[in-house]
Image (cartoon, rainbow, N blue to C red):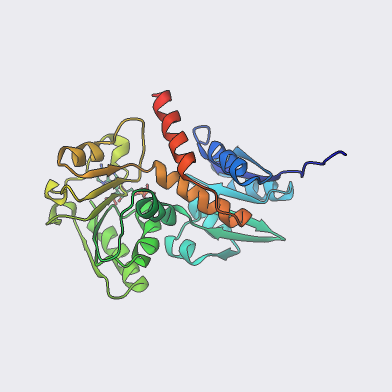
């Protein structure tokens, strides 16, 4: 008796540049673990042709896409329907194509929160949480963070007006949470969880906050990841804090996208462990 293998459904990650993306490897592992027939490739879009690139992919039968730098705002505009978390983020990292409909989601923030709670084992409920940065990465994290009901959320940024804009958004999304916006230099006391959503780590830089924020119970989380600890995590570690980089966030945002597309949530623990080993081996 012969068996016919199902034709795989096609997915891509679209960005510019895109050659560095780890998403194909992550989704290939998820597909294996869940026995889903998918094909997931990198797709480089010219900087001025994101929409045309997506439309060509849809026309070829594509079922969904992840969207990365610099197209998350264009993806937000292109979507014909948005999830509440994409609406709150003002940006889209996941598209699902269905009969002419383009659903836009944002799984970055839920990826962060899932990694903190389920992989690192820290609760956010009732905690003092500090969010460093007020750009797209910080905004994407806002709603999922607030949904965990921390006691306090302090948003600190170099340009304080951007922190205040994020504060205004946060105030629309929550109640009963003490929300504040300030400069890095104005942060005082210790934090239960401090999340670096600035891009300072790209320049091996750390925002100028007081290291009294770190205690041995503090979880210091950098959304960036690299084979070696970022400057933020080196500082946190030297002050005795618990450290975690953004590799788990990367895997968890991918898992949330996979679940949206396929209706099944992959196991992430083994995939994250494999990614860690591969990253160390390449360094
Ligand atoms: P992303 O999408 O990665 O969030 P972004 O929207 O350009 O990118 O935001 C970058 C964030 O990192 C901002 O909060 C930025 O601060 P400003 O709003 O003042 O520009 C912050 N940032 C970048 N480099 C920094 C540095 N060297 N020190 C502190 N903050 C930095």
Residue shown at 41%/44% (left/top)? 248
Is residue 122 visible in this depiction of the protein?
yes
In the shown orientation, is residue 173 left or right of residue 181? right
Is residue 71 visible in this depiction of the protein?
no
In the shown orientation, is residue 163 left or right of residue 189? right
Residue 77 in the image, given as x and y percentages of width and height? 54, 59
Residue 18 in the image, given as x and y percentages of width and height? 52, 36
In the shown orientation, is residue 190 left or right of residue 25? left
Quadrant where the C terminus lies? top left
Q: Could you tell me how many numbered marks the image carries?
A: 0
Residue 154 in the image, given as x and y percentages of width and height? 23, 61
The front one of 195 and 4 is: 4
Q: Residue furthest front?
A: 1
Q: Quadrant of residue 170?
A: bottom left
The front one of 142 and 36 is: 36
Residue shown at 14%/52% (left/top)? 185
Position of 22 relative to 168 (above/below) = above
Q: Quadrant of residue 149?
A: bottom left
Position of 189 relative to 229 (above/below) = below
Q: Residue furthest right?
A: 1
Q: Residue furthest bottom?
A: 175
Residue shown at 19%/55% (left/top)? 191
Residue shown at 49%/33% (left/top)? 20
Quadrant where the N terminus lies? top right
């Amino acid at each position: 008796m012969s068996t016919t293998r199902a034709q795989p459904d096609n997915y891509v990650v679209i960005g510019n540049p895109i050659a560095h993306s780890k998403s194909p490897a992550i989704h290939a592992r998820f597909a294996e673990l869940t026995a889903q027939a998918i094909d997931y490739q990198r797709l480089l879009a010219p900087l001025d042709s994101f929409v045309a690139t997506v439309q060509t992919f849809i026309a070829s039968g594509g079922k969904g896409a992840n969207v990365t730098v610099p197209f998350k705002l264009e993806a937000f505009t292109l979507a014909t329907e948005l999830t509440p978390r994409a609406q709150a983020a003002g940006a889209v990292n996941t598209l699902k194509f269905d009969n002419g409909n383009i659903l836009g989601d944002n799984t970055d923030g839920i990826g962060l929160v899932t990694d903190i709670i389920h992989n690192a084992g820290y609760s956010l409920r009732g905690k003092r949480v500090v969010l460093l940065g007020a750009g797209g990465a910080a905004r994407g994290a806002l709603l999922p963070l607030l949904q965990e009901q921390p006691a306090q959320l302090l948003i600190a940024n170099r340009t304080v007006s951007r922190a205040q804009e994020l504060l205004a958004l946060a105030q629309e999304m929550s109640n009963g949470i003490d929300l504040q916006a300030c400069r890095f230099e104005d942060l005082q006391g210790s934090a239960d969880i401090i999340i670096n959503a600035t891009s300072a780590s790209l320049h091996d830089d750390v925002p100028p906050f007081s290291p009294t924020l770190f205690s041995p119970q503090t979880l210091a989380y950098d959304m960036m990841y690299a084979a070696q600890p970022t400057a933020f995590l080196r500082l946190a570690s030297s002050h005795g804090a618990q450290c975690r980089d953004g590799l788990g966030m990367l895997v968890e945002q991918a898992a949330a996208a996979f679940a949206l597309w396929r209706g099944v949530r992959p196991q992430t623990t083994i995939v994250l462990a494999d990614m860690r080993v591969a990253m160390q081996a390449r360094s």
